[in-house]
Image (cartoon, rainbow, N blue to C red):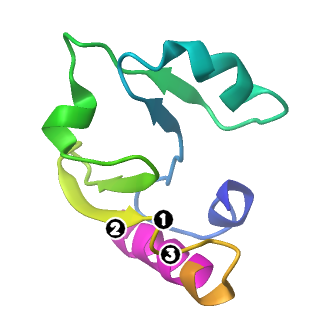
């Protein structure tokens, strides 16, 4: 999806990256194996997952000031479904415009 988003003109660039939950560091190597998605590690001190109030497989859409605009659950909306894929892409493009 990142490659597609890079071709769409928006006021701000759309950047997709993963944020692993604090305490789940042992899975980082497997999560990154064979992928190009930037991957960040949350810490108990930063508590990004807590401040964003997210669950596993949530996509958090941020505004230009890094405030949460919306959360989109990939558990409820499988990206293998073209409608879910298009919906998320539309949300991201709208947020960047």
Q: Are marks 1 and 3 in contact (CB under 8 Å)?
A: yes
Residue 47: x and y in percent read 21, 23
Residue at the location (18% across, 34% down)? 50
Q: In this figure, which residue is indicated by the disc labeled 2? A: 95
What residue is pinned by disc 3?
Answer: 77
Tag nearer the camera, 2 or 1 = 1
Q: Quadrant of residue 61?
A: bottom left
Judge the density around disc 3: few (<14), some (14-19), many (≥20) Cα neighbours within 10 Å.
some
N-terminal of the two: label 2 or label 1?
1
Of 1 and 28, the residue lying toward us: 28
At x 49% / y 54%, what residue is drawn? Answer: 14
Q: CA distance from mark 2 to mark 1?
A: 21 Å
- Residue at (85% x, 32% y) in the render: 34
Q: Quadrant of residue 5?
A: bottom right
| Residue placed furthest toward the bottom | 83
Q: Which residues are magenta?
A: 85-97
Q: Secondary structure at mark 2?
A: helix
Left or right, 15 with reference to 21: right
């Amino acid at each position: 999806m990142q490659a597609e988003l890079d071709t769409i003109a928006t006021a701000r660039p759309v950047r997709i990256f993963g944020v692993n939950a604090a305490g789940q560091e042992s899975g980082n190597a497997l999560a990154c194996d064979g992928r190009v998605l930037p991957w960040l590690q949350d810490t108990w001190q930063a508590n990004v997952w807590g401040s964003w109030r997210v669950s596993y497989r949530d996509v958090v859409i941020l505004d230009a000031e890094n405030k949460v605009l919306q959360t989109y659950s990939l558990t409820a909306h499988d990206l293998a479904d073209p409608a879910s894929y298009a919906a998320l892409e539309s949300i991201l493009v709208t947020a960047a415009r």
